Amino acid sequence: MLDAEGRVLGIDVGYSSSKMTTCFCRLEWTKITATFTFESATSDAAERSQALARLQVAGKVTAVAVDGPLTNGLGIVTHYRAAEAILSRGVLQTRGKPGQTSSPVGQQLHHHATALARLALDSTDVATAAHAEAIHGGAVVEAFPNMYLAALVPEPELPVLFRDASDRYWEILVNQSDRLKAVFHHALPGRELSNDLGAVHDHEHRAGVVCALTALSVACGEYVAVGDPADGDIILPAQPEWGRAAAGRGAWLEPVLASNVNSVRTARRCHANHRRARVLYVNGQPNNRLQPSAADAILSRRG
């Protein structure tokens, strides 16, 4: 249950030394309103600290979501993680899959994401983690805007992608419908959103919004976590919000994840942590334990 007034923080990770591609997005709400506020920086550590200070994140931050690989204890790993493997198989190969932490670019993103997570924890009053299988004592989680947005899109509306996944999904969920705003209103009912999401055109600001919504999903206790306990999870919106399948009942993403988890766990050549790959469906009842499904704990549900 969220407090009547509060805030979460989303961080879109950029690593350009000359362009302001790192975006900090604060989502703050009162009993009647809510507002997204943005600050940007380059990869320079001092600039990032100054940008976060300008955001004036006063008071307890219920959760922080960072768009980049985060692992247990905010350590650094060099292998391909289960979260990435699950979200890169089958049809997800063409729906905005994550990069591999094990690649050179992935390592760069991993180091920057970890540094930004530590900056948020050191510079703001982040709440103690209360979500399932947290990777840190503070409530910091990993966001991935491409798949967070893709999960919300009905299967018949999924676009053909090139290198513009999050922006294409944004157009469908914001400019062609109110589905993204519906996620906000489900988490914060009765609040008037001060921002016009349709007027948010900057790529990094859009990603910052999605990261903040990811943090909000965790703060509400209604989300889906994809990965494994050691190498961390990528957080998706709650399953009831997911887009419907083109044929049959249910969400298109749910059977895809089930199949991909099975493939990751049973692959001949995989990292040892992949044997513990799973998807956690968390439904907002914080006192219930994780319960395995009939499929050998491939899928687990909370509540």
Image (spheres, helix red, strand yellow):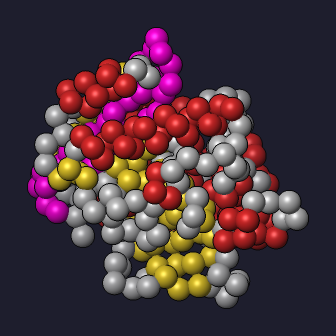
Which quadrant of the view contains residue 23?
A: top left
Which quadrant of the view contains residue 287?
A: bottom left
Per the image, is 152 magenta?
no
User: Looking at the image, how many numbered discs can be counted on the residues?
Assistant: 0
Q: Quadrant of the C terminus?
A: bottom left
Q: Is residue 87 left or right of residue 191?
A: right
Of 68 and 72, nearer the camera is 72
Magenta residue span: 3-32
Q: Residue at x 71, y 37 (%)?
A: 103
Q: Is residue 76 left or right of residue 137?
A: right
Residue 249 coordinates in the image, percent (x, y): 65, 71
Kindly tell me whether residue 260 is visible in this rendering. no
Q: Residue at x 30, y 47 (%)?
A: 121
- Farthest right residue? 268
Residue 41 coordinates in the image, percent (x, y): 36, 21
Q: Residue at x 51, y 50 (%)?
A: 75
Q: Is residue 191 left or right of residue 251?
A: left
Q: Quadrant of the N terminus?
A: bottom left
Q: Residue at x 51, y 72 (%)?
A: 281
Residue 136 coordinates in the image, percent (x, y): 40, 59
Of 192 and 37, nearer the camera is 37
Residue 74 coordinates in the image, percent (x, y): 46, 51
Of 43 and 202, nearer the camera is 43
Q: Is residue 129 above or below residue 234?
A: below
Q: Is residue 126 above or below residue 116?
A: below
